[in-house]
Image: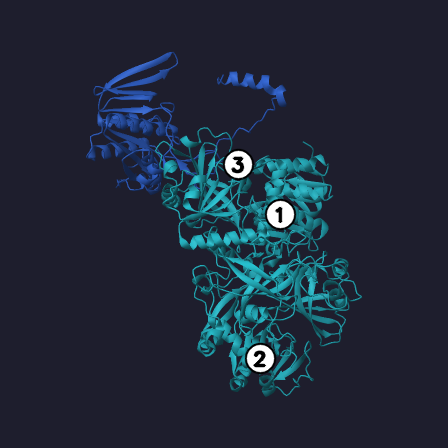
């Protein structure tokens, strides 16, 4: 089984974002970068499949040269090689992104049996790239998946819905977009990090196609003021705490 | 929450470990109406305290830091937030093993007991998850521990609140400082303005930003310290506490590893220096984690992963152990690596308590509070005094250059005489080019480039042969040359010319000048015009605040001459003591005047050759100064000596220095004049004369009687420290400063070794020596005394040992050497009757 996982370099959230002067980007000088939780479980799943079935895991991203950092992080988890479709830092629209990814996949020596993507990116949240790539490759796709089983050359995907769960069985090769909760991703080990340094990354430099979707302006939505409610002091607070735990479903 | 008060005795800005320590200790010492503010939330406002690794290794080569850390540990223990776990500093190299032996010396010298050297097997017994093949030994400190610094801060803050002395306001940001007539009067915040008598900046790496609002300068830079946490570690699965295993410092890789619950924390000071700008820190809202926790840059940690793996393969090499957390944590670094404590020299009543680590926090809070409330601290803070810096040292360039250079020395093997490589040639004397031509080896003091010795004197080494006391061991030969001792011997035969441009000079002038110097100086200042007085400057407790020379130039004018290293703090102390009615003023002449010293038996002949003025023994008495003409130069000549020979200090305007040099040089040729470096002036010349130096022998923890410098009579006039001094004179001293000579220099491997300073002095059965005040005996200064053919050590000794002829031991790099008390007190070893100086 050769698995390809697509990831995207996005700013770490947690702090207040500031928009650049031209209104088209966020100030990133002081920001750290990561990938979406959906993509973290995607890589973890791919590594588990390769561990079980044999084969390889390739991580692909379209982004600035600095996105090598995200590829290396995933190599530390267990991905074997990386493909970095380099941009000059400009955002590519979903169609352009999907075309470039599909071209890269078609051009690659490896015939990937399974392509896993996050259900949507953490920043733009277009929900499109997975489906567009599958369409361009002419492969079946399941989206919003939280369970993957590989057996007898076929894949079974499980998708939670309000009333229960849906199961999809597909021939390989296939494409799947997954959701956080698919598994609990491991932390990279130190030997994993050391190995990651030496793994190969292939760089591609396609032209950015004329975008059909243009970003005109970003705005930071008004943040909800943080609200703290004192539930009580000492043991007197216990019943209120229990009530909250029940509400959020942890007990 | 109550509203911000409009007035306070003191506003403490910052609620990290330092601000909380200050709040508690100021309240404990009796100050009420304290207001503490922080722009972040409580209990973790987001500064460096919040992400500190919180462990404490008490041994330090700086006595000041060691004592402050020792006191802090004691306070943490009293608060119940200290967990002792022990710690091992491991060595991968022989050079490091030697350094660990030095740490053993510092431990014994400063009273940190129970430390021992370990073999690799002994290291593994304590920390079984280390690979014994990677290390060659270790240094174990049983009293290493971990603290809960946030909890400690809360406890101290709440104690001050319970006393009714403190109100604390979180989420309150300073927007401005009000300075009136040079004095801080109010702090402006987003919640209102507080008028305050005192303002304390205890904000860690935000200090520069706040100081700037008041027109002051706190010279520090935020720097990254990388730390990762890996786990869960199977071996630690049953860990019940935060820390159960000894902390390991992998000194040669500039890293540490500590168990933290079921994880292992790995920190590094080895990566490239990553310096940030205090002006560019994110706000609490903008920060992803906190304003002082920046995103981890894994590429800077690549080598560290491999080195951690080497040392602890069982844990770090475990594929199931993952990196759970990693940050680029910010801490405060200063140009010389020491904290920034005390009133800012720019603004009265504005105090800095900055660049303080968790290990020193409560001790420094206590000491600075004592300084604010009582006028002085029990632990001498001289090397951390924020007033120590010259303007050039506070520039952005100097801060960045020196912190970048110093960062990787955090666990480094730093030689006592090691020189900075960056930002040199900042202050050049008028003789610089001439000195370069003479092959000067330049060392830096306070920015000045000063010749330490001259390569053109190399021929003298042969002339004097073994009398130069040649050294074979690399450690003692580093930053040293036998030429120093050869210059010394030649000066004693003919004459030497010494560049003393680094001196700090300032004039005190006006009708109130006499009262001012009388008050500050211990010795009689009401002397005839033209007298030069060497005097201690005391703190209230009778310890040494400084020692310096004062010339009376007119009925209403005194010139103070003091050393370059401590001169700025001296200047501030005199300024602080000026009369409030403005009847005396200070003029700093440091950059206006240059000084050349000429000493040796031929000094007078050389001077006579170029001046018509009377420089005879009778016509120019020792301890006097007067103007003499040398060609077209009007020179202020002062007949004193710090090297023990006949001679003068000669002062001229900076721009005329070169002319003075040339005149002396030319006239000196037929009298055997040689250029002499600071190696002689600062060490060999003084040590064989038993002259004490500020910062080594002289500090506030020792008094004038103990230093053997009490004059026969105490002057009538009042002076700072007089009451204490009178008391000290009426008591038998519990320690006396002695000069010891080394009887046998042969090490266990048969090599001759020479102590460098700070080594412990031990009894014949190798036990520590402690005086009645709990102070250990150790070598304050060490150096060659070429004219007496001995290596001399100075040390304070309790009365039972401070007896000439007493045999003792000095520990040096793991070996023990016999020493003898040669002089108890200040009598010189060389020329004890001072016949040379008075010739």
The answer to whether tags 3 and 1 share a subunit is yes
**Residue at the far right in the pictured view:** B716
Helix, strand or loop under label 1:
helix
Chain A, which colour? blue
Chain B, which colour? cyan
Residue B381, percent from left and from top: 63, 54
Circle number at residue A219: none
Helix, strand or loop under label 2:
loop
Q: Chain ID for label 2?
A: B
Q: Is residue B188 left or right of residue B721?
A: left
> Residue B337: in sight, yes or no?
no
Query: Which of the pair B709/B770 is nearer the observer?
Result: B770
Say if A217 sits above or below B765 in the image.
above
Looking at the image, tell me whether mark 2 or mark 3 is earlier in sequence order: 3
Quarter of the rendering containing residue B40: top right
Residue B541, percent from left and from top: 72, 56
Please rate how many residues cluster around mark 3, counting C-alpha atoms within 10 Å: few if below 14, some from 14 to 19, many from 20: some
Query: Residue tagged by mark 1?
Result: B364
Query: Residue tagged by mark 3?
Result: B285
């Amino acid at each position: 089984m050769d698995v390809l996982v697509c990831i995207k370099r996005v700013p770490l959230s947690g702090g207040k974002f500031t928009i650049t002067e031209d209104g088209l980007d966020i100030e990133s000088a002081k920001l750290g970068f990561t990938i979406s939780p959906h993509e973290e479980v995607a890589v973890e799943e791919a590594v588990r499949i390769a561990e079980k079935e044999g084969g390889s895991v390739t991580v692909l991203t379209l982004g600035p040269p600095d996105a090598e950092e995200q590829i290396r992080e995933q190599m530390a988890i267990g991905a074997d090689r990386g493909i970095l479709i380099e941009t000059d830092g400009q955002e590519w629209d979903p169609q352009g992104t999907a075309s470039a990814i599909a071209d890269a996949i078609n051009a690659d020596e490896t015939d990937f049996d399974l392509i896993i993507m996050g259900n949507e990116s953490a920043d733009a949240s277009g929900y499109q790239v997975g489906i567009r790539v599958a369409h361009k490759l002419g492969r079946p796709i399941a989206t919003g998946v939280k369970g993957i089983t590989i057996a007898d050359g076929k894949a079974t995907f499980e998708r939670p819905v309000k009333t229960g769960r849906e199961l999809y069985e597909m021939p390989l090769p296939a494409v799947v977009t997954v959701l956080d909760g698919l598994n609990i991703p491991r932390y990279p080990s130190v030997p994993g990090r050391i190995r990651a340094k030496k793994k190969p990354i292939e760089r591609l430099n396609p032209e950015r196609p004329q975008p059909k979707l243009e970003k005109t302006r970003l705005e930071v939505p008004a943040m909800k003021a943080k609200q703290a409610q004192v539930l009580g002091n000492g043991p007197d607070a216990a019943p209120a705490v229990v009530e909250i735990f029940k509400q959020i479903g942890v007990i | 929450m109550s509203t911000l008060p409009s007035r306070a005795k003191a506003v403490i800005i910052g609620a990290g470990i330092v601000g909380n320590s200050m709040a508690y200790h100021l309240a404990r010492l009796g100050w009420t109406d304290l207001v503490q503010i922080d722009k972040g939330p409580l209990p973790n406002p987001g500064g460096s305290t919040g992400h500190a690794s919180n462990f404490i290794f008490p041994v330090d080569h700086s006595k000041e830091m060691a004592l402050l850390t020792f006191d802090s540990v004691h306070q943490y223990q009293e608060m119940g937030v200290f967990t002792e776990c022990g710690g091992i500093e491991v060595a991968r190299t022989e050079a490091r093993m030697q350094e660990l032996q030095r740490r053993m010396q510092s431990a014994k010298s400063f009273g940190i007991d129970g430390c021992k050297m370990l073999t690799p097997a002994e290291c593994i017994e304590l920390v079984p998850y280390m690979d014994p093949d990677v290390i060659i030994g270790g240094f174990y400190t049983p009293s290493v521990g971990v603290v809960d610094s946030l909890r400690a801060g809360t406890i101290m803050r709440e104690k001050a609140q319970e006393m009714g002395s403190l109100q604390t306001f979180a989420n309150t940001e300073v927007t401005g400082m009000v300075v009136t007539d040079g004095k801080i009067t109010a702090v402006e915040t987003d919640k209102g303005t507080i008028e305050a008598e005192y303002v304390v900046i205890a904000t860690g790496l935000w200090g520069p930003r706040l100081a700037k609002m008041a027109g002051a300068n706190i010279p520090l830079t935020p720097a990254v310290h990388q730390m990762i946490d890996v786990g869960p570690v199977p071996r630690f699965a049953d860990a019940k506490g935060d820390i159960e295993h000894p902390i390991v410092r992998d000194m040669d890789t500039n890293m540490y590893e500590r168990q933290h619950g079921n994880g292992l924390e790995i920190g590094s000071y080895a990566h490239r220096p990553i310096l940030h700008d205090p002006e560019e820190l994110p706000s609490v809202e903008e920060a992803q984690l906190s304003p002082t926790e920046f995103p981890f840059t894994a590429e800077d940690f690549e080598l560290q992963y491999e080195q951690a793996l080497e040392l602890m393969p069982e844990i770090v090499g475990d594929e199931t152990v993952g990196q759970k957390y990693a940050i680029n944590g910010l801490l405060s670094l200063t140009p010389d690596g020491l904290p920034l404590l005390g009133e800012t020299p720019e603004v009265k009543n504005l105090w800095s308590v900055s660049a303080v680590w968790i290990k020193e926090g409560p001790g420094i809070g206590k000491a600075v509070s004592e300084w604010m409330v009582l006028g002085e601290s029990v632990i001498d803070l001289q090397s951390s005094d924020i007033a120590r810096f010259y303007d050039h040292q506070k520039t952005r360039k100097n801060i960045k250059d020196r912190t970048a250079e110093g960062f990787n020395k955090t666990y480094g093997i730093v030689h006592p005489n090691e020189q900075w490589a960056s930002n040199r040639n900042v202050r050049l004397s008028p003789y610089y080019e001439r000195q370069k031509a003479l092959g000067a080896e330049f060392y830096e003091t306070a920015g000045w480039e000063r010749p330490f010795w001259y390569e053109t004197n190399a021929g003298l080494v042969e002339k004097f042969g073994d009398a130069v006391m040649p050294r074979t061991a690399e450690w003692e030969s580093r930053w040293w040359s036998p030429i120093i001792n050869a210059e010394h011997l030649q000066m004693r035969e003919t004459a030497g010319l010494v560049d003393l441009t680094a001196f700090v000079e300032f004039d005190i002038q006006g009708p109130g000048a006499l009262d001012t110097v009388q008050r500050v100086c211990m010795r009689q200042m009401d002397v005839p015009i033209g007298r030069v007085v060497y005097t201690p400057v005391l703190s209230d407790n009778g310890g040494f605040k400084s020692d310096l020379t004062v010339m009376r130039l007119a009925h209403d004018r005194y010139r103070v001459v003091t050393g370059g290293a401590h001169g700025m703090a001296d200047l501030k102390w005199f300024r602080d003591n000026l009369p409030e009615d403005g009847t005396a003023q200070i003029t700093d002449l440091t950059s206006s005047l240059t000084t050349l010293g000429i000493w040796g038996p031929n000094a007078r002949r050389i001077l006579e050759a170029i001046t018509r003025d009377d420089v005879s023994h009778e016509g120019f008495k020792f301890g006097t100064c007067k103007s003499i003409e040398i060609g077209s130069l009007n020179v202020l000549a002062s007949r004193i000596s710090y090297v023990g020979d006949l001679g003068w200090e000669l002062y001229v305007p900076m721009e005329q220095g070169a002319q003075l040099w040339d005149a002396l040089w030319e006239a000196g040729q037929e009298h055997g004049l040689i250029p002499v470096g600071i190696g002689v002036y600062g060490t060999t010349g003084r040590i064989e004369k038993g002259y004490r130096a500020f910062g080594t022998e002289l500090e506030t923890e020792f008094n004038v009687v103990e230093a053997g410098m009490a004059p026969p009579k105490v002057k009538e006039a009042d002076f700072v420290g007089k009451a204490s001094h009178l008391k000290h004179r009426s008591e038998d001293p519990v320690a006396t400063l002695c000069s010891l000579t080394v009887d046998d220099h042969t090490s266990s491997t048969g090599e001759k070794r020479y102590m460098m300073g700070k080594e412990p002095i031990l009894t014949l059965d190798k036990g520590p020596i402690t005086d009645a005040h709990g102070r250990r005996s150790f070598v304050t200064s060490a150096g060659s005394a070429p004219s007496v053919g001995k290596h001399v050590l100075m040390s304070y000794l309790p009365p039972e040992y401070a007896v000439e002829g007493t045999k003792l031991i000095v520990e040096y790099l793991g070996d023990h050497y016999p020493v003898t008390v040669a002089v108890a007190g200040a009598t010189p070893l060389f020329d004890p009757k001072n016949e040379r100086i008075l010739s």
